[in-house]
Amino acid sequence: MPPDQQTDAAAPRRPRLTPPIADVRRAVRAVLPTGSDTAGTALVLVALSGGADSLALAAATAFEAPRVGLRAGAVVVDHGLQPGSAEVAATAAATALELGLDPVLVRRVEVAGEGGPEASARDARYAALDAATAETGAALMLLGHTLDDQAETVLLGLARGSGAASLSGMPARAGRYARPLLGIRRAETRQACLDAGLTPWDDPHNLDPAYARVRVRERVLPVLEAELGPGVAEALARTAEQLREDEAAFSEQIEEFIEEICEPAEAGIAISVGALAANPAALRQRVIRHVVGSEFGVSLSRAQTLEVARLVTDWHGQGPIDLPGGVLATRAGRHVVLSTTGSTEILPHDH
């Protein structure tokens, strides 16, 4: 083969630009850091499973990152949950290298099974992604969640009765994690792969009705689209975006309010009963959830939140309330004290 033909054969594939490829590239371009301080140094990683969403994301990142002076790599996480998972990971890694991504890291994780298969796999995956980000010093980790994933998340949150925080879905940006494709449909990422000559891997777990998310994807959303008309997924995603804006504004106000009504306590924090009682139930319960979450890293269910609120609204001498994480909620005079020891001692502000 002549040398010029060899060079052409070895060159990275340059697919014809189609609307799906352009849409994915545009979405990636919007989240990439820019500026002279990133040139030649900053690394962006893609969490790559080999599926259509992350593969389209990887291809778009490989194209866009160098154009703003960034390096682009990939992390492939092998959960080891099905036969041949190592081969799937190796294929995804090889595709990433063909796309020009570097470094390409493959990480095998152990899924403990605690909290259910989906939750434990997610925990293991994010632990591996966190470690890869720290190891490489990457400025950003891109995740391939799409508009469809966001709609499914909102429906699952609605079914659990999880409140506005859950219904606000997945954030487009959280720390070093970014989700550029939350405005892109799953069908479009698949078409982008096909247009680019890429063959995505189809995870058999994505068709297993044992998983609630699969049932929402395969049964619930199609029924809603059929009965209510097209655009249901987009409407759910818009709802998530609006709720996230509301949640962000409300959380900022809550932070300021909490500083006024809380005092330090032994092994915990104390909240003014008077301030809680003087405000509407929605604000009172949000304060309780926020204080417990920020102070102890614990999420309260609605039932647990209401039980703590009764120490304010329906106080008749009841004893301490056991909460997750070994936290106890106790009424002590003019305060509800939250602590890990059961102590109700209020400390001076300058303690």
Image: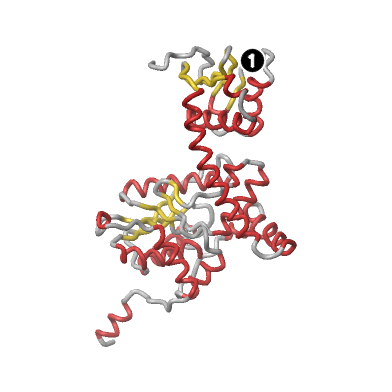
Q: Residue at x 56, y 17 (%)?
A: 335
Tell me: residue 350, above or below residue 137.
above
Packing grade of label 1 (10 A; few <14, some 14-19, many >=20) is few
User: Which image quadrant: the C terminus?
Assistant: top left
Tell me: residue 174, above or below residue 261.
below
For the residue pair 12 and 333, the one nearer the viewer reads as 333
Q: Residue furthest right?
A: 227
Q: Is residue 211 left or right of residue 33?
A: right
Tell me: residue 344, above or below residue 111.
above
Q: Quadrant of residue 323?
A: top right
From the top left corner, tell me how far across and down residue 229 is, in percent. Answer: 70, 64
For the residue pair 286 and 278, the one nearer the viewer reads as 278
Q: Residue at x 62, y 57 (%)?
A: 235
For the residue pair 163 and 213, the one nearer the viewer reads as 163
Q: Quadrant of residue 13?
A: bottom left
Mark 1: which amino acid?
Gly
Q: Quadrant of residue 278?
A: top right
Q: Is residue 318 left or right of residue 91?
A: right
From the top left corner, tell me how far across and down residue 236 is, in percent. Answer: 62, 55
Name the element at disc 1. loop
Visual colour scheme: secondary structure
Tell me: residue 20, above or below residue 347.
below
Q: Which residue is mark 1?
A: 319
From the top left corner, tell me how far across and down residue 60 is, in percent. Answer: 41, 66
Q: Residue at x 48, y 58 (%)?
A: 144
User: Which image quadrant: the N terminus?
Assistant: bottom left
Q: Residue furthest front?
A: 278
From the top left corner, tell me how far across and down residue 48 is, in percent. Answer: 44, 59
Q: How many numbered marks does the figure carry?
A: 1
